[in-house]
Amino acid sequence: MSEPIIGNVMSGRTEVFVVCQADAIERSGAVSVSLSQIDDGASAGRFIVVRTFGNDYFGYVNRCPHESVWLNIGCGACFSADRSFLRCGWHGARFEIETGVCIDGP
Ligand code: FES
């Protein structure tokens, strides 16, 4: 069994969440999660965790900077056709997986 993926959210304090087992995400795959506090139901937000083909993991807030929609809006996919970039499902902006930098799109 692999180690769990831990989310670390900065919102004035450090919050730690177990997202899933690391091997639950296939290589060149991703999971989108919505995190909430159990005690009061307050949302900590939506996140996306990406596992690269090279076996690195990257986590981002799942929100396109263009119109603040989820990257996987629409068909649920969050990658370019060749899975080399994260891709917004609304207008097609593309982002580097390793940095989150937008390289194409509005
Ligand atoms: S909302 Fe993502 S590219 Fe426009």
Image (cartoon, grey):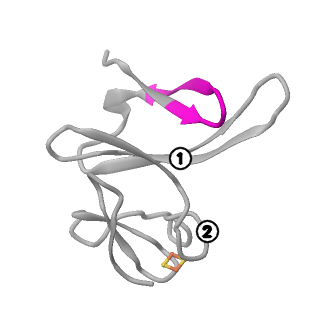
Numbered-mark total = 2
Numbered label attached to residue 98: none
Q: Position of residue 60 (x, y in %)?
A: 45, 49
Q: Residue at x 56, y 34 (%)?
A: 9
Say which quadrant the N terminus sits in: top left
Residue 74 lies within the magenta run: no
Give the amino acid at mark 1: Phe
- Establish if 65 lies above or below 21: below
Q: What residue would you read off at disc 2? A: 68
Give the amino acid at mark 2: Ser
Q: Residue at x 35, y 39 (%)?
A: 25
Q: What residue would you read off at disc 1? A: 47
Residue 19 lies within the magenta run: yes
Magenta segment main secondary structure: strand
- Using residue 9 as the reference point, say whether residue 96 is left or right of it: left
Q: Position of residue 99 (x, y in %)?
A: 30, 54
Mark 2 residue's CB less than 8 Å from ligand 1: yes
For the residues marked 2 and 1, what is the alpha-carbon distance in whole angstroms?
13 Å
Mark 1 residue's CB less than 8 Å from ligand 1: no
Residue stretch in magenta: 8-20
Q: Residue at x 85, y 28 (%)?
A: 40
Say which quadrant the C terminus sits in: bottom left
In this orientation, which residue lies closer to the viewer: 73 or 106? 106
- Establish if 2 lies above or below 29: above
Q: Earlier in the sequence, mark 2 or mark 1?
A: 1
Q: Quadrant of residue 54?
A: top left
Q: Quadrant of residue 11?
A: top right
